Amino acid sequence: MNFLSRYCLATPLRTLSKGFRFGRLPKAGFRILLFHHIPAESFFDFEKLVSYVVSSHGVMTPDEAASCLVGDMVQNRRFENSNAPCLLSFDDGFHSNLEIANTILRRYGVKALFFVSPGLINLPSSEQPAAIAKNIFQARITASELNNDTRLLHWQELYELKRQGHVIGCHGLLHRRLSELTGSELEREVVFAGNLLDRELQQKTDWYAYAFGDIDSIHSEALQLISRRYRYCRSGLRGINNFKTLRSAIFADSLAPEAPLNYQKLLIEGGLDFLYLARRRALNKMSISV
Ligand SMILES: [Zn+2]
C-alpha cells in the first residue's frame, strides 16, 4: 500500500478498525509517537497534531510511561478514562527538535524523550554533515543539503532540554545498524555510547532506541547488550505498550506531521497495528531468547 492510497483509505480504515475492536481496545496502555527532524514549514501541522493528541488522548511523561511498563498504574490514574495516552519521542537529536521543545512542547506542557548519538555529537563540526548524511540519512541526501536545522544538538543544548524536564536517551554511538555489528564494535556502539551520555550529561541513561528501528536492524546479541546496559529499549515497530510489554521490545508509531490528520489519527488509534503483528512477534521472540 503506497502512502497516497493509505491516506485515501484512512477514514474507512478508521471506521473498520473501531468496529472490529469493540471491547478489545487495550485502553490500559500507551503509545509512543516517533518523530525525527521536523522542518520549520511543518511546525504548524505538528502543532495541530500535538493539540489533537493532548485533547483526545493525553500525553504521558517519560516517567509515567516507564511506570506503566513496570505495572505501576498508580501514577497513571489521570489517564484511566481516556483513549490510549501517548508519549512523544524524537530520534537523531536534530536542532529542529530544540525549536519544537522551546515553542510547541512548552506551550502544551509536553515532556518528551529525545534519542541522540553521542559519537556524532562529538565529531568536529567540519566532519559532522558527512557523517549525518551517511549514517542517519543512509546517503539519501548529501552533506551539502543539510542546514542549521539539520545539524545535531550539542551538549549545552541537550542540557537545556534536560533542564526543561525532557529525557535524553541513547540512539547508538554513531547511529550504526546494530544487526551489522558484533563483538567489540557492537559493544562500543551500545555500551560505550551510554557511558559517554552518562558522563557528558551527568545522568543515568535508562532509555535506548536502536537506529532505524525496524526488525532487520536488530539481532539477539544487540538486544542482550542493550538489556544489560539500559532499562528500556524502544523499537520503531507499531503497537501499543502496557505492563505486559517486554522492556527490551517497546513499540512506537512513526508519524510524519505533514501527513493528513485523519491518517495520523488512524495510526494513533492502532489502525495499522495488524500489519506489524509478525514483526512484533519476531522482536518479542528475540527479546525472550536473550
Ligand atoms: Zn535515527
Image: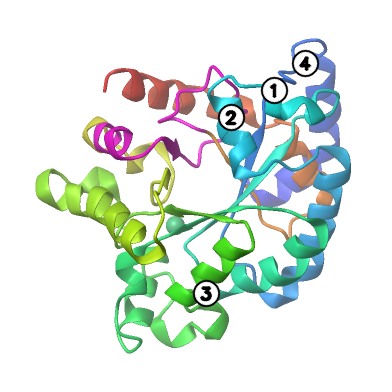
Percent x, y of residue 64 = 64, 36
Per the model, the C-alpha gap separating discs 1 and 4 is: 26 Å
Instruction: Write down the quadrant of residue 265 in the picture.
Output: top right
Q: Which residues are magenta?
A: 223-250
Which amino acid type is shown beneath numbered disc 4? Arg
**Residue of label 2:** 67
**Residue of label 4:** 21
**Residue of label 1:** 74
Instruction: Determine whether label 2 and label 1 are within 8 Å by CB.
Output: yes
* Label number found at residue 157: 3
* Direction from residue 128 to residue 100 in the image, left or right: right
Which of pointers 2 and 1 lies earlier in the amino acid sequence? 2
Which of pointers 3 and 2 lies earlier in the amino acid sequence? 2
Q: Quadrant of ligand 1?
A: bottom left
Per the model, the C-alpha gap separating discs 4 and 3 is: 43 Å
Per the model, the C-alpha gap separating discs 2 and 4 is: 26 Å
The response on whether ligand 1 sits within 8 Å of label 3 is no
Whether residue 241 is visible to the viewer of this picture, yes or no, is no
Which of pointers 4 and 3 lies earlier in the amino acid sequence? 4
